[in-house]
Amino acid sequence: MPAAETPCEPGSAGQTIVFSDVRLDRGGMRTLAGIDLVLGERRIGLLGLNGSGKSSLLKLMVGLLAPTSGSVSIDGLSPTDDAAAVRRRTGFLFQSADNQIVYPIVREDLAFGLEGSAEEAAAAIAGALGRLGIGRLADRRIHELSGGERQLVALAGVLARGPRTILFDEPTSQLDLANRNRLCGVLDGLPQQAVVVTHDLDLVAGFDRVLVVGDGRIVADGDPADAVAFYRRRYG
Ligand SMILES: Nc1ncnc2c1ncn2[C@@H]1O[C@H](COP(=O)(O)OP(=O)(O)OP(=O)(O)O)[C@@H](O)[C@H]1O
């Protein structure tokens, strides 16, 4: 198996995500400009007001958007030109689970697109569901699950692929307090590198690095306490 397809094991390194003078226009308007970043930490948070460009930054990392100018690389690969390799190594959890669940039964959905033998796929699915404590949902119909359960199933689908990095777009926004706390616990224990867009300021408290996006630029970049304090001062 080539290195690019090796599933992440506990303790394995994440990836280095590089933005070089990135500009992004959406709908004819400047969304991001002058973005220069090297991100290699294990837990990275992205804060910012609605519409500030956080999700756009995340989508650039995995090639769901392409820069208008400048470049993005992830471990030396281009998210747009090397899309298949980047997406094997980099999972994306959408804000709404319905955007990434395709099949009607949980187990079928998790099997979709998995590489390897049927036994390897079954083991990856069982491992992912087990890690999230939702093995009991394996044979349930997706449309009968609650929103929180669907969110966890969508995360299991990402985990089953063994990515090195997981990009989370507002992972707690649709969860009740119990499921929000559960997701925080899961996030804490994941061996993968995680980049998390959130409005949940407590979620980033133990992170290694937190960035604040404002007016299409990075307006703060540091440890969680400093970045959150800046965010509250500037926008609170
Ligand atoms: N499909 C699109 N076409 C044109 N403009 C878009 C599109 N999607 C988003 N935008 C614009 O890009 C800007 C940044 O959006 P983005 O979703 O990255 O912000 P965000 O910081 O993640 O916001 P939120 O916190 O509300 O999710 C916004 O002004 C938004 O209106």
Image (tube, grey):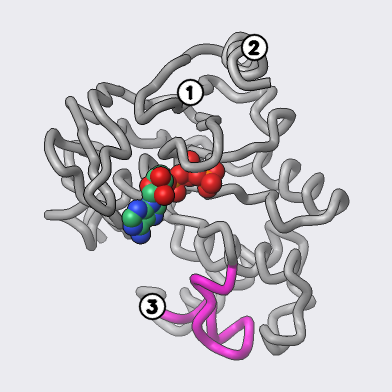
Near-viewer residue (215 or 54): 215
Question: Which tag, 1 or 3, sits closer to the chain's start?
Answer: 3
Amino acid tagged 2: Arg
Residue 64 vs 216, above or below: the answer is below
Q: Amino acid at mark 3?
A: Gly
Q: Which residue is mark 2?
A: 233
| Disc with the residue nearer the chain's start (1 vs 2) | 1
Q: Are marks 1 and 3 in contact (CB under 8 Å)?
A: no
Q: Secondary structure at mark 2?
A: helix
Q: Is residue 6 visible?
A: no
Residue type at mark 1: give it: Leu
Asked whether 99 falls inside the magenta stretch, the response is yes
Q: Mark 1 sits on what residue?
A: 211
Question: Quick one: quadrant of the C terminus?
Answer: top right
Q: Which residue is mark 3?
A: 113
Q: Is 178 on the left-hand or right-hand side of 148?
A: right
Q: Separation of disc 2 and disc 3 at Cα? A: 45 Å
CA separation, marks 1 and 3?
A: 33 Å
Q: Which mark is residue 230?
A: none
Kindly tell me whether residue 179 is visible in this rendering. Answer: yes
56 shown above or below 43: below
x, y percentage for residue 80?
Answer: 18, 54
